[in-house]
Image: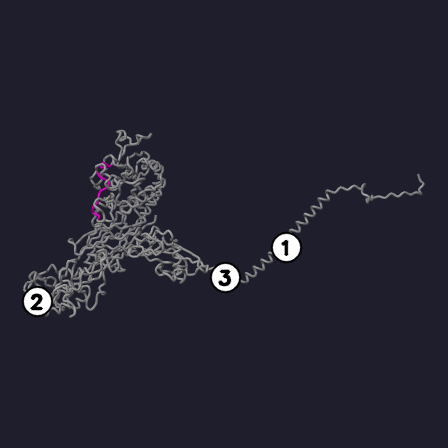
Amino acid sequence: MGLASVQVWMTVLLLGSTVADNDLYAGVHSPGFFQHDSNICTSRGVMTCKECLSIHPSCAWCAQEVFEKSGSALARCDLRDRLLQSGCGARFIEFPASSVRILEDVPLSDRAGASGSDITQIQPQKIHLTLRPEDSKKFTVKVKQVADYPVDLYYLMDMTNTMKDDLQKLYTLGNDLAKSLQDVTSNLRMGFGAFVDKTLSPYMYISPVEAIRNPCFRSFEPCPPQFGYRNILSLTDQVGRFTEEVKKQKVSKNRDSPEGGFDAIMQAVVCKEKIGWRSDASHLLIFTSDDKSHLALDARLAGIVQPNDGECHISDINEYDKTSILVSQHISDRSPNMAALTYFPIFGHFSLQTRIPYRQLNHNKTDKISENNINLIFAVTSNMVALYRNYSELIPGSAVGTLSRDSGNVVQLILDAYAMIRSKVELELLNVPEELSLFVTATCLDGEVIPGVRSCAGLKIGDMAKLYGCPKEKSQTFTIKPTGFKDALQVTVDFACECTCQKSSVPTSESCHFGNGTLECGVCLCDQGRLGSRCECSEGDYKPTQQDTCRPNPDTTTCSGRGVCVCGQCVCNSNNFGKVWGPYCECDDFSCLRSKGQLCSGNGECNCGLCQCSPGWAGESCDCSTRTDTCLGSGGMLCSGRGHCLCGACECTQPGAYGSTCERCPTCPDACTIKKECVECKHYKRGDLYEKDCNHVCRDEIVLVDELAFHETNAVNCSYKDEDDCVQNFQYHEGARGKSFLYLVEVPECPKGADVLVLALSVVGAILLLGLVALLIWKLLITIHDRREFAKFEEEKAKAKWEAGNNPLYKGPTTTVQNVAYCGS
């Protein structure tokens, strides 16, 4: 099995989140704020050192009581270099710097050892961050799944009578399962558990009395009594016992269709000592069933109202003894998107409910599967796959496989699911302080950097948290761990929110106009009713000549109409909508664009009329998501190859396409047919789309290559014949950021023209060949004719019969002559 690894660059932001650039740093670089002697530090009109540090990481405060800028509080908050140029001594400048220190950095392991306890799968293991408000620091987390890692496999089986064939098949496949897993790991332990349903009415038969002892009393073959959950075999390295225990089991029977599977899962997860889960092994919990499990409020039918407490309740006889006391589901009113009485699966106890804000969950009680590093594999029949796949989306580190009717494919199903889990690395963020905003970028095996995700498969956006103020605890710790791993990264954060000069403040200082304020960090914090840089004015003072200094030019309203001019300075009025600041009260944090009733769509901060978007968002009102995983179709292509991903949603450009990922299109051709038209119009400047809407439909970038190479697993190789009878070859690939590419072979495969000489010789040769063939055919026909005539002659000759006596023309071969003059005797 191949190793899966992921590198994560994590940017940690304190006190809110801002726009992230390509280097993953949030906020705005200080040089961009210079404009006519003004920058982000001077434009906010802050009056204290603490407020200055919270504006931006580039801001510094001068605590020197008197320096070139006359000591005004408005001039003390500036860029560090500008304060030095203005005469502020370096030892008086408050400019805490953020930093990252690695406290523990053990290298990653390549292979599991004999014990498994000395394996390191995450690096580093401990880091210490010092952060000031709105600052960000980047650190790298490396995760690697080592080879030959120990495996604990616990097989949890539905033991109702509909699973009888599956039980028999598991007995025959038990040795095969152990042998196949031993090819994956040399350190294997296996266990077995079973479940039926709650042992009270209406879930079981209680009448007649015989039905309690034998639920199958109407059948020819008896069955054992119903039970909730039973730990039959704790995890053991004697894997042969697995088959022995399975052979001993017999199915039972319950009354209703849903089973008590979630009760069994809970006990198998939390009863670590009873089950025998090792801390240094992969924990595989195989759940097999052919039916659904009970939903919320089902237990009330039997009068059970006590919620499941998420604790272990296995008795000395290895049975769940709270099956008739604790509900298997509970009601949750913590989700703002759900009504108070909502059917809520038991996953609320042992996994994350994605619609509940991350910070509202108590991980010690609710995230049992993650807490115990369990990888849950649902092996269910085809009619239940869709339901359990929905469950799996709520459970980190889980997978779903389709079980055949007799569980004949269970061995391969487990191997495939385990391989899928091992090939995926996903980070969990536990106990993250609300004051921190995390932005994660993953770099997977292919080297592609994917911002905004914390997984290399099934992309998910990291959780974000914002707070406008410093936390009470100045040092907090949170954990980053891969799902299903025991290894974790411990991150300790010190919040640099305070200025050191605050500790030496002087109440009723003489420097503040005879004790009318407190001297803190070089400025006077005036008592109530006093104003001015040295508290020299009272609120009752008023001089018309001072009005001109409270407006940028004579044509504007004093203090922008949102404040009063006192002692030559604007005192901004309070506003129910938010904060008003600036030398002329010209800025606020509530005049930005709104979307869905929220400033900056709730995805950014309003700063003097402009939205500063959080990482993962863009647009004037921060309403455009930069995520692309929400646009992935079932085939792994963005918008199913029929549109473009804009603001996290698909814009279908193919006529007739619709659906959240443009997956439905009864009249659409395949991706190759669509992109063929884009090649024609964008590269060759021809085709049906060239004079229509080529730029709207085809937003692909065409890259010319000499030959097609492997780019991505979801890339599609295409070819077509153009109007010149040339074969065009190209590859269609969409990156994770939504940009699509067409890798086009620069030289098409075109047919060559005819050779005249070869053609002429071919014609002459063909004529000669045809003449020769005609002569041969003629000769053959003459020969056949002659042979037929000769044979006929021979036949007639054989039939002829001649007699010489009857032939008047016949003359014999001899002639007799008689001599008449002969007188002899």
The answer to whether residue 412 is above or below residue 140 is above
Q: Main secondary structure of the magenta part?
A: loop
> Quick one: SS at disc 2?
loop
> Which of pointers 3 and 2 indicates the residue nearer the eye?
2
Instruction: Give the class, few, some or many, for how many residues have Cα within 10 Å of label 2's Cα (few <14, many ≥20).
Output: some
Q: Which of the marked residues, 3 or 2, is nearer the chain's N terminus?
A: 2
Instruction: Give the class, few, some or many, for how many residues have Cα within 10 Å of label 3's Cα (few <14, many ≥20).
Output: few
CA separation in Å, label 3 and label 2: 98 Å
Magenta highlight range: 320-335
As drawn, the label of residue 542 is 2
Residue at x-position 46% and y-position 59%: 725
Q: Which of the marked residues, 1 or 3, is nearer the chain's N terminus?
A: 3
**Do the residues under discs 3 and 2 have CB atoms within 8 angstroms?**
no
* Residue 812 picture location, percent across and down: 83, 43
Of residues 188 and 532, the one drawn nearer to the viewer in this rendering: 532
| Residue type pointed to by label 1 | Leu
Q: Quadrant of residue 185?
A: top left
Question: What residue is pinned by disc 1?
Answer: 775
- 594 horizontally vs 535: left or right: right
Question: What residue is pinned by disc 3?
Answer: 753
> Quick one: SS at disc 1?
helix
Q: Which of the marked residues, 2 or 1, is nearer the chain's N terminus?
A: 2
